[in-house]
């Protein structure tokens, strides 16, 4: 994109924006970098490349207490030099998705986009209706970004269903500290099944009680359990070193970013993304992003 086009993406257009902390800049830089790397590298390897965003938001975010506007994951994915063949944006907030549709129409009118308004856990049939029917003659690969505010927004059965129907890599935000660790007392109550739904299992309870590392923090433990569940689905996972912990302004841990692919090349792309999105190597200069 040209400098002018980038500037337009961070202008105040008087439509609703998500209020986020400054740590979101780092996350969005990684999304933008990976989308660009994925879209270009896979262009000649697959007949169709699909970008799927399960919590798309409104397309723009504003940094809390600073007034700085940054493009959200939808606009970042749409901005790549080699656009995806299809974009699917899911969002349950009607005001958010309305603003997103208007922004997409303004900045990227030539992109092929589908919008789903509703709880993604309840909209799977609608989602699969919008994804092309791939075959050995028409191969498709999807990159799915999963960015919930808390564990209650995503069911593991939803992820299981998506990967069972299409070839897909996932980038998942695990709210390990901003939600899970903070609410340990609540989530570990016998009658609360929130984590059972989030992980797709209830065996985590016994493992937590019997763990041999009593000093292990609950948020780290559940993040590990989530990754092990993804491994059960055939995704590559070697251990906690594959996770990236995102911290807040005061260095407090907030959440983990976890990338999942069934192929080493996908993991290679993610590791390159992590390495090349350090602050001094930002894809979007701090003064412009």
Image (cartoon, grey):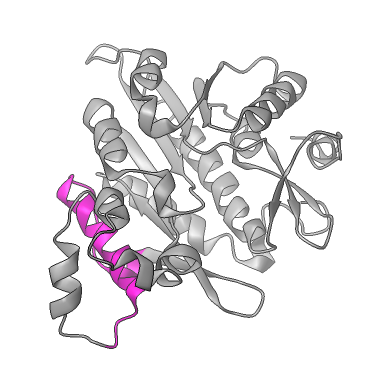
- 32 left or right, relative to 242: right
Rendered-image quadrant of the N terminus: top right
Residue at x-position 48% and y-position 48%: 148
Q: Is residue 45 visible?
A: no
- Is residue 235 placed above or below 207 in the rendered structure? above
Task: Please check the rendered image and state whether residue 216 is part of the magenta-colored stretch, yes or no.
Answer: yes
**Residue 166, quarter of picture:** top left
Task: Please check the rendered image and state whether residue 87 is part of the magenta-colored stretch, yes or no.
Answer: no
Q: Position of residue 248 (x, y in %)?
A: 61, 72
- Is residue 147 placed above or below 82 in the rendered structure? below
- 98 left or right, relative to 257: right
Q: Position of residue 42 (x, y in %)?
A: 42, 32
Residue at x-position 68% and y-position 30%: 95
Q: Nearer the viewer, residue 288 or 147?
A: 147
- Is residue 21 placed above or below 95 in the rendered structure? below
Q: Position of residue 182 (x, y in %)?
A: 46, 71
Q: Which residues are magenta?
A: 215-242
Q: Nearer the viewer, residue 52 or 120?
A: 120
Residue at x-position 29% and y-position 57%: 195
**Residue 66, quarter of picture:** bottom right
Q: Residue furthest front?
A: 191
Q: Nearer the viewer, residue 9 or 189?
A: 189
- 248 left or right, relative to 234: right
**Residue 140, quarter of picture:** top left
Q: Residue furthest bottom?
A: 215
Q: Position of residue 55 (x, y in %)?
A: 52, 39
- Is residue 77 placed above or below 209 in the rendered structure? above
Identify the main secondary structure in magenta. helix
């Amino acid at each position: 994109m040209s400098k002018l086009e980038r500037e337009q993406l961070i202008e105040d257009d008087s439509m609703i924006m998500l209020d986020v902390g400054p740590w979101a800049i780092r996350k969005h830089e990684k999304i933008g970098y990976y989308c660009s790397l994925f879209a270009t590298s896979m262009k000649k390897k697959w007949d169709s490349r699909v970008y799927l965003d399960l919590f798309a938001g409104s397309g723009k975010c504003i940094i809390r207490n600073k007034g700085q506007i940054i493009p959200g994951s939808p606009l970042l994915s749409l901005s790549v030099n080699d656009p995806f063949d299809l974009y699917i944006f899911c969002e349950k907030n009607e005001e958010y998705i309305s603003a997103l549709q208007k922004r997409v129409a303004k900045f990227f009118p030539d992109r092929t986009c589908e919008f789903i308004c509703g709880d993604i856990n309840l909209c799977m049939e609608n989602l699969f209706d919008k994804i092309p029917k791939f075959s050995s003659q028409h191969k498709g690969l999807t990159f799915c970004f999963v960015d919930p505010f808390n564990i209650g927004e995503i069911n593991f059965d939803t992820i299981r269903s998506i990967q069972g129907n299409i070839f897909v890599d996932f980038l998942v935000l695990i709210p390990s500290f901003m939600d899970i660790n903070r609410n340990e007392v609540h989530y570990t109550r016998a009658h609360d099944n929130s984590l059972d739904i989030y992980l797709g299992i209830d065996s985590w309870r016994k493992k937590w009680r019997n763990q041999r590392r009593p000093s292990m923090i609950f948020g780290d433990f559940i993040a590990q359990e989530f990754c092990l569940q993804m491994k059960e689905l055939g995704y590559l996972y070697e251990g906690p070193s594959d996770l990236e912990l995102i911290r807040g302004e005061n260095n407090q841990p907030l959440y983990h970013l976890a990338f999942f692919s069934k192929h080493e090349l996908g993991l290679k792309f993610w590791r390159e993304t992590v390495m090349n999105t350090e602050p001094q190597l930002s894809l979007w200069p701090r003064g412009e992003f």
